[in-house]
């Protein structure tokens, strides 16, 4: 629960518990439909039930706070490669990789991302890759705790503890305010 301040009729501030909104049920795009148009980059656990463990912010940080999820736009590119390639953009700027770190910034050079073609990603779901890398984590808690705030995400070194994730796509639709697309 979060505490919100409510003004009484007498003008005094009192705190009353207000239930937190339930996390939206984002539909993860099935294989062949990921990283197209506008969407959220979602973090799915690489093992077990492939739990949805949050999303990336507009600056490319991993968060479990749904209100901080960024809106990404994927620009598909025509190349001679046999796999789909694309660039990602947010209001913070183009997304890129620096060393092993994923980030989005106005000074970034857009990175040429692709889809993970191997069977060790999530079955039936498009997962982001950069070259031969795709599995990601933070050097802190995996997933980050809500109270810690968004955390830098990078390709795993296998020294991290917790759950490693694949970056996947939840398409959005609508006008100025985008809403999740239900995927059956």
Image (cartoon, helix red, strand yellow):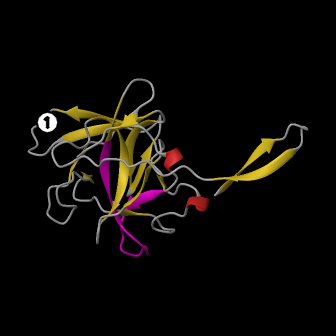
Mark 1: which secondary structure? loop
Above or below — where is 114 with respect to 87?
Answer: below
Percent across and percent down for residue 110 are 34, 38
At 50% from the left and 63% from the top, the residue drawn is: 144
Q: Residues within 10 Å of mark 1 (few under 14, many from 20)?
A: few
Depth check, front residue: 32 or 91: 32
Percent across and percent down for residue 55 are 42, 51
Q: Quadrant of residue 73?
A: top left
Depth check, front residue: 46 or 138: 46
Q: Circle 1 sits on which residue?
A: 79
Magenta-drawn stretch contains 133: no
At 15% from the left and 32% from the top, the residue drawn is: 78
Please state if 153 lies on the left or on the right of 122 as rendered.
Answer: right
Magenta-drawn stretch contains 161: yes
| Magenta segment | 152-170
Q: Quadrant of residue 118?
A: bottom left
Please state if 137 lies on the left or on the right of 87 as rendered.
Answer: right
At 47% from the left and 32% from the top, the residue drawn is: 91
């Amino acid at each position: 629960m979060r505490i919100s301040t409510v003004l009484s009729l007498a003008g005094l501030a009192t705190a009353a518990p207000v239930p937190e909104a339930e996390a939206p049920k984002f539909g993860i795009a099935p294989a062949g439909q990921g990283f197209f148009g506008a969407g959220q980059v979602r973090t799915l656990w690489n093992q077990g039930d492939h739990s949805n463990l949050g999303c990336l912010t507009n600056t490319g940080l991993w968060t479990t706070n749904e209100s901080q999820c960024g809106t990404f736009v994927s620009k598909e590119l025509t190349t001679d490669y046999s796999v789909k390639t694309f660039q990602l953009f947010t209001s913070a700027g183009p997304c890129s990789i620096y060393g092993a770190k994923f980030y989005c910034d106005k000074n970034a050079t857009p990175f040429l991302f692709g889809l993970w073609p191997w069977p060790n990603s999530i079955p039936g779901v498009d997962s982001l890759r950069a070259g031969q890398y795709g599995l990601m984590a933070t050097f802190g808690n995996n997933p980050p705790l809500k109270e810690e705030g968004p955390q830098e995400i990078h390709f795993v070194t296998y020294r991290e503890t917790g759950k490693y994730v694949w970056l996947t796509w939840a398409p959005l639709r609508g006008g100025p305010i985008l809403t999740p697309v239900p995927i059956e």
